[in-house]
Image (cartoon, helix red, strand yellow):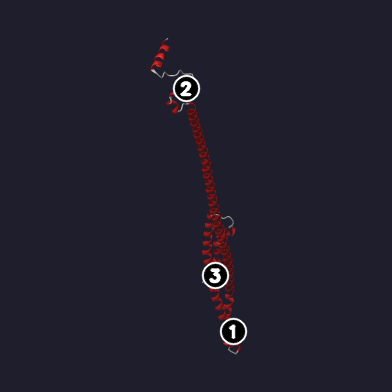
Amino acid sequence: MNFSFFRSYASTKVQDAAKSAVDALVAFDPEGATQAQIDLMEKSLDELGVKLSAVQRQYDDAQGHLDSATKLNATRLTAAETLQGQIAAGDTSKQQSLDTLLSIIEQAQPELDALKKDAADVKNYLAELQTAYSTAAEKLKAARRQLDQAHRDMERANLAADRAKDRAETAAIAAGVRSGGDTLNVAMEAMQRKTRAATDAAAAANLKATTLAPQDHEKEDPNIAAALAAAAGAPAAPQSTADRLAALKSRAA
């Protein structure tokens, strides 16, 4: 295993890969965010999630290599202790083997320390990404809630405006009907006045005609008719043949 390559990959490439997404998410302000901004944030969050998954795998690998190296180091130490015990018991033939094993253990220590540092660094960065992801997710949810609330507020405002418009139109129509009714009433009253005036005029004419014109029984009675004619200054109509002839002679004279 090329541990130096892994350390370089874990300590630089992994961190650089997620930096832009983290920066964008940290700078995001949910207050008043537009749908386009929310969509962009969601895309950045998805990218961060992919990188988070990659860092998780890298941490698992680093921890796996560290566990293997730590287990091997512990096994070597146990073996060295066994050899040391054998030597202490008088078996000096094991001294060269112990020296060789101790040299191997000592040479592996820097690599083991590096693996510990790699695992710790990746673990810390993983924790940072997890915190950034959780914070960004909360920001995204807050932005969505605020945008949804803004949409609902706008819909309610539009509905209120429509209702107010309907009420205004209804009031205008009602006012028009009342105005039309008033106009109709005025016209009706004018026609009724004209009708009453015409009726009164006709009644007056009838009264005048009745009052001034001779009644039928006055016309039928010759004596009343003659008296009325005489009262009006009109000559009496001749009643007999002699009267008629005398009247004609009087007019001829």
Say which label, 2 or 1, has the lower sequence index: 1
Relative placement, left or right, of 96 versus 206 is right
Q: Position of residue 69 (x, y in %)?
A: 55, 76
Asked if the residue at tag 2 contacts the one at tag 3, i.e. Cβ–Cβ closer than 8 Å, the answer is: no
Depth check, front residue: 216 or 58: 216
> Which residue lies under the disc numbered 1?
81
Please name the residue that numbered disc 2 is placed on: 227
Residue 99, compared with residue 222, is above or below; it is: below
Q: Residue 114 placed where, x, y %?
A: 58, 71
The mark found on residue 129 in the picture is none
**Which residue is situated farthest in the left direction here?**
241
| Measured Cα–Cα span from mark 3 to mark 2 | 148 Å
Residue at the far right in the pictured view: 88
Q: Disc 1 marks which amino acid?
A: Glu
Q: Nearer the viewer, residue 88 or 77?
A: 77
Q: CA distance from mark 1 to mark 3?
A: 32 Å
Q: Which residue is mark 3?
A: 59
Q: Foreground mark, 2 or 1?
A: 2
| Labels 1 and 3 touching (C-beta < 8 A) | no
Q: Is residue 26 left or right of residue 208?
A: right
Q: State the image quarter where residue 77 is shown.
A: bottom right
Q: Can residue 100 be seen here?
A: no
Labels 1, 3: front one = 3
Which amino acid, by three-letter code, is at mark 2? Ala
Earlier-in-chain disc, 3 versus 2: 3
Tell which of 21 and 4 is nearer to you: 21
